Image (cartoon, helix red, strand yellow):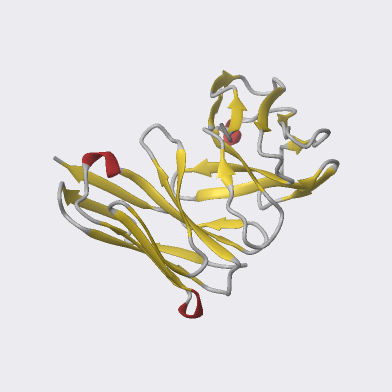
Amino acid sequence: EAQVTQNPRYLITVTGKKLTVTCSQNMNHEYMSWYRQDPGLGLRQIYYSMNVEVTDKGDVPEGYKVSRKEKRNFPLILESPSPNQTSLYFCASSQIGSYNEQFFGPGTRLTVL
Amino acid sequence: GIQVEQSPPDLILQEGANSTLRCNFSDSVNNLQWFHQNPWGQLINLFYIPSGTKQNGRLSATTVATERYSLLYISSSQTTDSGVYFCAVDMGRLYFGRGTQLTVWP
């Protein structure tokens, strides 16, 4: 089954404790991205990647890192989480190009105390 | 940057009613997608519709790219239609509207 998977689905952590949210897709998509969703703000892009070893900032990259060492994986790293990073996070992937549908993972609900 | 506005922000319906959700955008776009976010937070692709009209069961969508809007129609609504509906436009990457919160009562 074609899908985007994320782990963990739920995470409660404390300020300053490094964490990684994994994202993996099995559709051989070149493009992958991370979004965060906050009440009343919709989804905002954090980082995106056009291919292996190619990443770039989205609208809200502060406090986050990403890497793309393999085509299928695009982990999101929070080196020193803070409470304002409490949010619902989504990973997405698609083919490159102007007319390609994006597919979203199930979401990761993160709480930073 | 591009502005994506959805209306109405909230909609409350009784089961069986029809509804229309609107998405306006401020610039020409490559494509447009509609999503349903269910009460568990999952984003479900409804339509990928850069232009024209598509139908899937009780749902249909129309995008008029030249006039910069898209409409999502829900007919004979059911309680399972409840959730937030987002439109997102592609300008090289997706820009989301703030969503329409739909509540369908039995």
Q: Residue B101's x, y, as percent?
A: 33, 49
Q: Nearer the viewer, residue A50 or A38?
A: A50
Q: Residue furthest right?
A: A53
Quick one: quadrant of the C terminus of chain A?
top right
Please give the name of the residue rendered at 57% of the width and 74% of the height, measured from the top-left corner.
B27
Q: In which quarter of the view is residue A110 placed?
A: top right
Q: Residue furthest bottom?
A: B66
Please give the name of the residue rendered at 15% of the width and 46% of the height, measured from the top-left corner.
B15
Vertical position of residue A72 compared to residue B57: above or below: above
In this picture, residue A13 sits left or right of residue B62 = right
Q: Nearer the viewer, residue B99 or A60?
A: B99
Q: Residue A7's x, y, as percent?
A: 61, 24
Q: Nearer the viewer, residue B54 or A62?
A: B54
Vertical position of residue B101 compared to residue A7: above or below: below
Q: Residue B81's x, y, as percent?
A: 29, 44
In this picture, residue A53 sits left or right of residue B38 = right
Vertical position of residue B34 compared to residue B31: above or below: above
Please give the name of the residue rendered at 44% of the width and 64% of the height, measured from the top-left corner.
B5
Please give the name of the residue rendered at 72% of the width and 27% of the height, measured from the top-left corner.
A80
Vertical position of residue B27 compared to residue A69: above or below: below
Q: Residue A67's x, y, as percent?
A: 80, 35
Quick one: quadrant of the N terminus of chain A?
top right
The total number of labels drawn is 0
